Amino acid sequence: MSVVNQQEVLASFQVLVSMAKADGKLLEEEVASLVDTFEEINLPDGITVDKLLSETDQSIEALLNQINSETAQEMVYQSACAMANIDGECSAEERALLDKIGATFSNSKLWGKQEWLETLERRSQKSSISEQVRQIDDPEKRAVEVEGITTDACFLNAVLGAFPIPGIAIAFDMLIYWNQLDLAQAIGQSWGYDRNREDFRKAIFGSLGITGTRIAVSNLAKLVPVFGMVVGATTAFASTWALGKVANEYFASGGEMDAFSLRQAFKKAKKEGEAIYKTKADEIAAKKREIEPQVQLLNEELKAGVISPDEYQEKLKALL
């Protein structure tokens, strides 16, 4: 992996802020998502959330010219792609900025460029949790079911989060996102709601900042040296736990919780999830060690073109 210096890390994060502002405005939920996610990672000394959000004097061209290592270029492009496309609503402004990033970094190998990322987004959207859950009228049985699928999703996502591998981690981050979405939909189904109602996804995920922005920042966080297995696993576990709790509250309220209430409940539940993670940490680390050789082999096979992105996704899911 090529060496990445602090200036490149700063410029990389600022490119993502530029992507968030591509359409000329930074929405409240986008600001919340950026702030929350930046606060979850240990930013390098001298880099603050306020600095990242407020410094806009440099052009996108100037920022991109500061990112010279192949590793950083690859991960900036991956993150920008995820940020623009994860919700299926890539704007013309976002597309233009994404094209500019790709053109600027055209001399880089950019392994996994557009085709690989689009395949990841397409293939990771279908999970199995919600296929197994139907409406449950008995409150006690529903509570047990929701607790069970939430706990399972937390463990799965914590294992995925324990692989902070630059260049590959975007695949794990996307799977975490889609597993969380599937969990929320499954909980909704247990309350009798249609899992495909887009307004529920926007209400819960938009309010909580669980968006392409979070995936993008999380991916770039792997450029920060202190971001390791424990940070990734803890964050994935705690955020999934909190999402499960908040989704259950949301559907129990008949979908009447407002954005402020959702965010407050999420923050409270996330602290609870962090505490629960500590009781599961050894088990999660053991599972990570168990599958690590197979994951490494899959990574090498994908990079070498031995397996396709579709096969990579399926084999990765099978390991978990």
Image (cartoon, grey):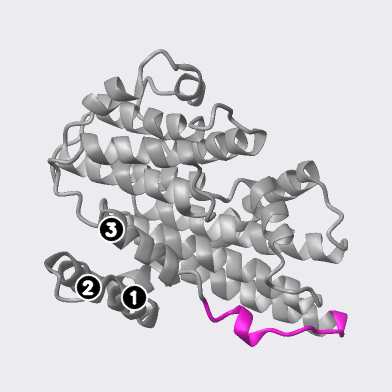
Contact check, label 1 and label 2, Cβ < 8 Å: yes
Disc ID at residue 86: none
The residue wearing badge 2 is 298
Mark 1 → mark 2, Cα distance in angstroms: 8 Å
Callout 2 secondary element: helix
Residue at left 65%, top 48%? 206
Q: Is residue 129 magenta?
A: yes
Q: Nearer the viewer, residue 266 or 289?
A: 266
Return the disc, 1 or 2, that comes first in the chain's sequence. Answer: 2
For the image, the number of numbered tags is 3
The residue wearing badge 1 is 316
User: Where is residue 44, by image quadrant?
Assistant: top left
Amino acid type shown at disc 2: Leu
Counting from the top left corner in percent of width and height, residue 113 is at 26, 53
Residues packed near mark 1 inside 10 Å, few (<14), some (14 to 19) or many (20 plus): some
* Residue segment shown in magenta: 127-139
Disc ID at residue 168: 3
Return the disc, 3 or 1, that comes first in the chain's sequence. Answer: 3
Residue at left 48%, top 65%? 157
Amino acid type shown at disc 1: Leu
Can residue 261 be seen at all in this image of the molecule?
A: yes
Q: Is residue 77 magenta?
A: no
Residue at left 14%, top 49%? 109
